[in-house]
Amino acid sequence: CGACTVIAVGSDGHPRAINACLRLLCGCDGLALTTVEGLGSQGAGYSQVMKAIAEGQGSQCGFCTPGWVTAMSALLGGAAARGAAHLTAKEIEESLDGNLCRCTGYRPILQAFKRAFAHDDSSVIADLETRAPCHDVATGKPCGRRCDAALQASSLSNGEADRRAAARRECDRALRLVSPTAAVAARARAPVSLRYEDEGSGLSYSRPASLEGLVELLRREPAALLHCGNTGMGVGKYYTPRGPTAGGLPPQANAALVDVSGVPELAA
């Protein structure tokens, strides 16, 4: 659902959003991890992303909010690491499909982020109501967009145009704020070969650091489960005494997991 999203920075210095619940602890070796608490707080001050989702009414029950904040922060940090000057509204909308929300219906969340960090006008993304105009719930007749006119008048009277312009200027500052600091980047390093065995369940985890090492490992363990993004059986969503299991499948005793994320030729 994305609520557990954290920011991972590897040796390349590029922040990436990952689901903490799907990442094996072994697979975090060499990564510098930042949770939502590391992005801002009441005591240390809130980040621009935190302010944007709060001021844009993008949080209701709050369960998914940390995940949205970290995902958006990783997106901004990734753009900064690539040397991108800005993000577009389309990029923001298409990059946050790993986060779910059951309260707000997504609109206020996406609008808050686009309004704060998109370089272009967020109206370039077609609004649902432009395709199916809203209706008066009492009469069933189209409302004629009077609500939009009232909102626009209210927004302009409250200096909405100036606020949006200022928010756009804050985008560059926000990019710098979520970029990995020198201290964080220093803790990240290139993947090294790893091997871990759990004698109790028979589970083994291997992470080769070269293509040759991967080939040799598969020769020794031809039934090994390959995983990288941890979205298949390699996730082992639940680890039982009889081995990992997921999706109603029986536990796989003596399972051998092979993480290919450390093989340069197979890295994204």
Image (cartoon, rainbow, N blue to C red):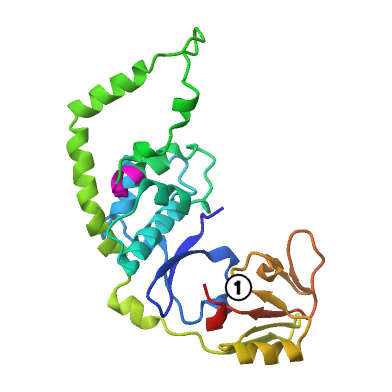
| Magenta span of residues | 114-119
Does residue 226 appear anywhere in the picture?
Answer: yes
Above or below, 5 against 148 in this view is below
Residue 173 occupies which quadrant of the picture? bottom left
Q: Is residue 222 left or right of residue 43?
A: right
Give residue 22's position: percent from left, percent from top.
Answer: 59, 65
Location of residue 211 (image quadrant): bottom right
Mark yes or no: residue 58 visible: no
Q: Secondary structure at mark 1?
A: loop
Residue 248 vertical position relative to residue 90 in the rendered view, above or below? below
Left or right: residue 229 versus residue 175 is right
Taking the spot 47% from the left edge, 40% from the top edge, the residue there is 106
What secondary structure is the magenta-colored segment mainly?
Answer: helix
Q: Residues within 10 Å of mark 1 (few under 14, many from 20)?
A: some
Can you give x and y, in whole percent of width and height, for residue 184 in the image?
34, 76
Residue with the mark numbered 1 = 228
Q: Amino acid at mark 1?
A: Cys
Report x, y in % for residue 212: 62, 92
Taking the spot 82% from the left edge, 66% from the top edge, the residue there is 250
Give the residue at the far top of this rendering: 139
Is 226 within the magenta?
A: no
* Residue 82 picture quarter: bottom left
In the rendered image, the vertical position of residue 99 relative to residue 160, given as above or below = below
- Is residue 117 highlighted in magenta? yes
